[in-house]
Amino acid sequence: MVSAGAVSARFPDFPWDTIAADKARAAQHPDGIVDLSIGTPVDPTPEVARRALIEAADAPGYPTVLGPESLRRSVVDWLDRRFGITGVETDQVLATIGSKELIANLCVQLGVGPDDLVGVPETAYPTYAVSAAYAGARTLVTDSRVAFGPQRPKVVFINFPANPHGRVVGADHLRAWVEFARETGALLVSDECYLEFVWEGEPVSVLDPAVNGGSLEGILAVHSLSKRSNLAGYRDAFVVGDRAVVAELLAVRKHLGFMMPTPVAAAMEAALADDAHVDEQRERYARRRAILRSALEHAGFRIDHSEGSLYLWATRDEPCRQTVAWLAERGILVAPGDFYGASGSHHVRVAFTATDERVAAAAARLAD
């Protein structure tokens, strides 16, 4: 029998539990807490997705693991329409039950084991490292290809636009990672969930033929509708890439029963086909980003990177937990940078996914 302690020892403490006292302090503010710690959508789910969900509600049969052909076709069309990416076929697309599920289970589902090495970014969403830990694999935390030396990683995770710091990179940077993965035989997994939220520069995907040379061999790109379409509660996501790897994931996931519910798939298909709601959401986030950035800078913060994603990577050049406490005294809760690795120890992540009213409240408090 496996003890609960043995299971929990494989993973770090759940990070959000460590700021419970700061959350309680922020909640004591007379005007209530402004929670900018988690990038959860707060704006309405688009009508086009809700309507599709309702219309598909009579779904007595089992869905497929791969996802409906029409859904996968909508992914192919979206990549072409929004990013000019061509050459992707529907059998290179797999529907997933949110992107975190896919990332966390990926190493296990692809047979990565204790003798294997997994590369994760230096300052990163914790689930990449969790995926490696779940498989019992070794992890190398680095942003440098040189750091691997003679080692040949099995999987390498990258993330641009990045969570937490919002860095955006160009085609040359991504092309170098693709070349490294192919030279070493690694699978390159590019988390691109924020690709439609680039504020400075241009969005670039590893799926672009200009990056990958017209081949998706050794590449997976992970995408989600949680942020672009306010569908976090629906768990709508997909992965696109190497046909053989997608087929392997499909074979494993059939045995495990990872199936996107039929009404959810219908909502995802409808949302992918509609650009108007995404453009509207971008305008909302752009306004909130500008307000919070100005307020933070006037309060003495420096904003690093933050060219993309839904966060501002802010610092007062002090230990991040001190900054979290300083903001909590003003009723504002943010995520400490050390959630995302030691390199974030002097930054905090400030989400601009709160309502207009709460963002305005945060700006006013920072001005006091």
Image (tube, rainbow, N blue to C red):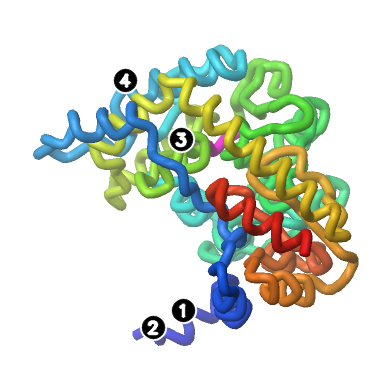
- Marks 2 and 4 sit apart, C-alpha to C-alpha, by 43 Å
Residue at (77%, 52%) from the top-left corner?
Answer: 295
Residue kind at label 2, given as amino acid type: Val
Residue at 46% from the left image edge and 43% from the top image edge: 43
- Expressed as whole percent of the image width and height from the top left, the position of residue 242 reads 54, 29
> Which of these two is toward me, 117 or 228?
228
Residue designated by label 3: 229
Instruction: Rate crowding at label 4 as few (under 14), some (14 to 19) or many (20 or more) other CA atoms within 10 Å.
Output: few
Q: How far apart are marks 4 and 3 (CA)?
A: 19 Å
Q: Considering the numbered disc 4 on the image, is that residue within a helix, a strand or a loop?
A: helix
Disc 1: which residue: 7
Q: Which amino acid does label 3 sit on?
A: Ser
* Residue ID at (77%, 31%): 200
The correct choice, above or below, for 130 with respect to 282 in the image is: below
* Residue 2, label in figure: 2
Is there a contact, CB below 8 Å, between mark 1 and mark 2?
A: yes
Q: Please identify, in this view, whether the residue under mark 1 or under mark 3 is nearer the observer.
A: 3
Residue 13 seen: no
- Upstream in the sequence, badge 2 or badge 4? 2
Q: Do the residues labelled 3 and 2 touch (CB within 8 Å)?
A: no
**Which circle's residue, 4 or 3, is located before the other in the chain?**
4
Q: Which residue is drawn at 79% across and 62% down?
A: 347
What whole-number distance in Å separates the C-alpha atoms at marks 4 and 1?
Answer: 40 Å
Q: Which mark is residue 70?
A: 4
Asked if the residue under mark 4 is in contact with the one under mark 2, i.e. CB atoms within 8 Å, the reply is no
Q: Image quadrant for the C terminus?
A: bottom right
